[in-house]
Amino acid sequence: MTLTAMLENTIQQHGSKSALAHKPKGGTYQDISYTQFGESIAAFRSGLIAQGIQKDDRVAILSENRPEWAIADFGILAAGAVTVPMFSTLTAAQVGYILKDSGAKIICVSTEKQLEKVTAIRSDVPTLEQVILFEPVEGEYPDGVIGFEEVCYRDGEMAPTETPDETNEEDIATIIYTSGTTGAPKGVMLTHANFISNLEACTSLIDIGETDVLLSFLPLSHVFERLGGHYVPLFSGAKVAYAESPFTVAQNMQEVMPTVMLSVPRLYETMHDRILRAVQAGSSLKQKIFHWGVSVGSAVSSAVQQGRKPSAILQLKARIADKLVFAKLKAATGGRLRFFVSGGAALPQSIAEFFHAAGLLILEGYGLTETSPVISLNHPERWKFGTVGVPVPGIEVQIAEDGEILTRGPHVMKGYFNNEAATAEVINADRWFHTGDIGMIDEDGFLKITDRKKNIIVLSNGKNVAPQPIESELVQSPFINQIMLVGNERKNLAALIVPNFDELKAWAAENNVETSDLGAMHQTREVQQLIQREMRSRLTDFADFEQVRRFELLENEFTQENDEMTPTLKLKRNVIIEKYGDVIEQMYPEDS
């Protein structure tokens, strides 16, 4: 069974039902049926073969989420070729590296903006023969560029080929290049069997069906969205609606009314912060009602987590709280949401508990690109906040002596493309994959992630500090937007902090602190004491050696554009440490 064969089964069962939905600029959402989707895939497959694509050739996609992305992916697979997805935020140099390393013959790009990146590096990529542009342009296409419609509709008609599909489940379906927080990106080879085993394991735990609608806004180039927001719904007869952009998600939720949504923790944190800011701006009566509603919701949540039925009085209070406090929040998600799914980074437990108190369940999972991706998952019938769930069916998980999480099974990648040495470093002779994450399995079988193995900070006294839990706690402060701990081989921890500039300026204005010069404001005694109080109050449950003793407030956010974050919004710690080396040294004057 291959990915294309599984989709063909769905098309036969749900032909007239909507498979995809997209919103043209200035328009409203338009549906594409499963039958239309299948016809477009067949036409694109035919066009690729006419362009000379053969089995196992690599075809890249550089595009935002849109119907053409899905059509291209399945068309590539149906041609027996390999999809090489790229984040639309990559630079021209990064695009060039992936094209050269993968040996891609064709690249599909969404817009002229993305085409410019390819044009800039095309002479350095000898294997690249053709560029397919999704959005039509006026006039003639540049040399070596062909329109998506022309590929699908030769001579004005859709022209499927008679060439048989010879793909088998052990063939490579995709090569996904890791974000590369350290070193050059590596191409992860995932087979049809890898994906199918993982989607079958996940759908055995989470019921996705033909009545479901998913709003897709995480990049399809990321394996989390590729599986959970692309393959899973399309093999389940559900509908995938594409957000116009990451900045229109709130509006698109109102229009699409999704039943399921996948996101990284940042979305939930942003929603939480906006809610609290709105409450703080309201009257004292509204604030009291809100906090009462949260306390009622928390009591209901606690009872559910303990397997108890809430009392009749508590259920009555919950109905009132839902009407007075939480109805607007649910309406903001479209009003039909069954649950959220969170992945890609650690979800603060307090955020999960808040949303559950409001009647919205966030199911957190865990995995890596190399594991197709899901290793463990909380699901509607069995979940525990503060964990990443239980291992999905059909795979093995064990904790090594040093605390590293190991996994084995049909979900583990075939290897890194053209890099046997790197493959041997992470997959041992017994086929155990070393995740590089530190964790533990609790008494109920739930997996809990402590941190990345390479992120562990070793203090000069030999104490090991996992920065992630501390950073996750501190970033809950309304005054802290981003934070990165440092302190390797130092006596104690320090932090580089990007403040929440709006909140900090508002606080400074209320407390008569000059705000015209950002740098000067950061150095005032009042602001320094505010941040110190925030850290002390939020780290009371952490050990003495885990306390942050020093910090520096930065004037600029960590961004992808400055190469400080990956496309999945993970901090590139080595890059940041090098960039702010002088600042870090100033926080440790005794070591100078």
Image: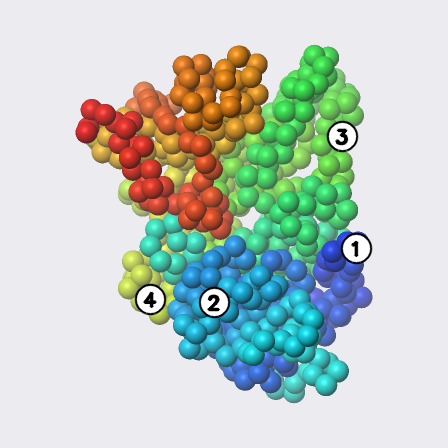
- Within 10 Å of the Cα at label 3, are there few (<14), some (14-19), or many (20+) other Cα atoms? some
Residue 585 occupies quadrant: top left
Label at residue 120: 2
- Within 10 Å of the Cα at label 1, are there few (<14), some (14-19), or many (20+) other Cα atoms? few
**Which residue is denoted by mark 1 in the rendering?**
27
**Contact between labelled residues 2 and 1, with CB atoms less than 8 Å apart:** no
Q: Secondary structure at mark 1?
A: loop
- 550 left or right of 75 in image: left
Relative to residue 509, is residue 67 depicted above or below?
A: below
Q: CA distance from mark 1 to mark 2?
A: 33 Å
Q: CA distance from mark 4 to mark 1?
A: 46 Å
Q: Position of residue 306 (x, y in %)?
A: 58, 27
- 10 left or right of 171 in image: right
Q: Position of residue 524 (x, y in %)?
A: 42, 17
Q: Position of residue 447 (x, y in %)?
A: 45, 41
**Which residue is denoted by mark 3 in the rendering?**
327
Q: CA distance from mark 2 to mark 4?
A: 27 Å
Q: Position of residue 473 (x, y in %)?
A: 46, 28
| Lower sequence index among marks 1 and 2 | 1
**Identity of the residue drawn at 73% across and 24% down:** 325
Label at residue 419: 4
Relative to residue 397, is residue 478 depicted above or below?
A: above
Relative to residue 440, is residue 477 depicted above or below?
A: above
Q: Secondary structure at mark 4?
A: loop
